[in-house]
Image (spheres, helix red, strand yellow):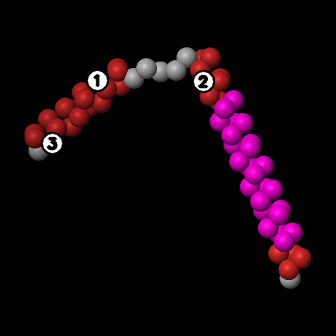
Amino acid sequence: MNKYIAKASQYYRDVVNEMRKVVWPGKEEIKDLTVVVLTVSGLLALFTFVVDWVIGSAMGKLL
């Protein structure tokens, strides 16, 4: 049982050490990346809508 506690403690220390190495983005970078994500998501939604509409229209004409 003691071996498992030692392994868990070591794992926790390793996680804390790795998290200290992380470079977190600033507010401005978060804002910029949020705009990028929303823009790409909107374009993908628009593309999906257009493709669905074209395929639906084609299927309506065929059937």
The disc, 3 or 2, on the residue closer to the chain's N-terminal end is 3
Q: Which picture quadrant has residue 28? A: top right
Residue plotted at (69% across, 29% down): 35
The image position of residue 16, as x and y in percent, is: 30, 25
Circle number at residue 56: none
Q: Secondary structure at mark 1?
A: helix
How packed mark 1 is, by other alpha carbons closer than 10 Å (few <14, some 14-19, many 20 or more), is: few
Circle number at residue 17: 1
The disc, 1 or 2, on the residue closer to the chain's N-terminal end is 1
Q: Which residues are magenta?
A: 35-58
Q: Nearer the viewer, residue 31 or 11?
A: 31
On the picture, is 48 further left or further right than 17?
right
Above or below, 41 against 50 in this view is above
**Residue 37 among those drawn in magenta:** yes
Above or below, 50 against 57 in this view is above
State the residue position of label 3. 4
- Looking at this view, name the residue that lies furthest to the bottom: 63
- Which image quarter holds the N terminus? top left
Residue plotted at (70% across, 36% down): 38
Amino acid found under the numbered disc labelled 3: Tyr
Circle number at residue 30: 2
Q: Secondary structure at mark 2?
A: helix
Q: Nearer the viewer, residue 28 or 43?
A: 43
Amino acid found under the numbered disc labelled 1: Asn
Q: What secondary structure predominates along the stretch shown in magenta?
A: helix
Which one is closest to the eye, mark 1 or mark 2? 2
Q: Secondary structure at mark 3?
A: helix
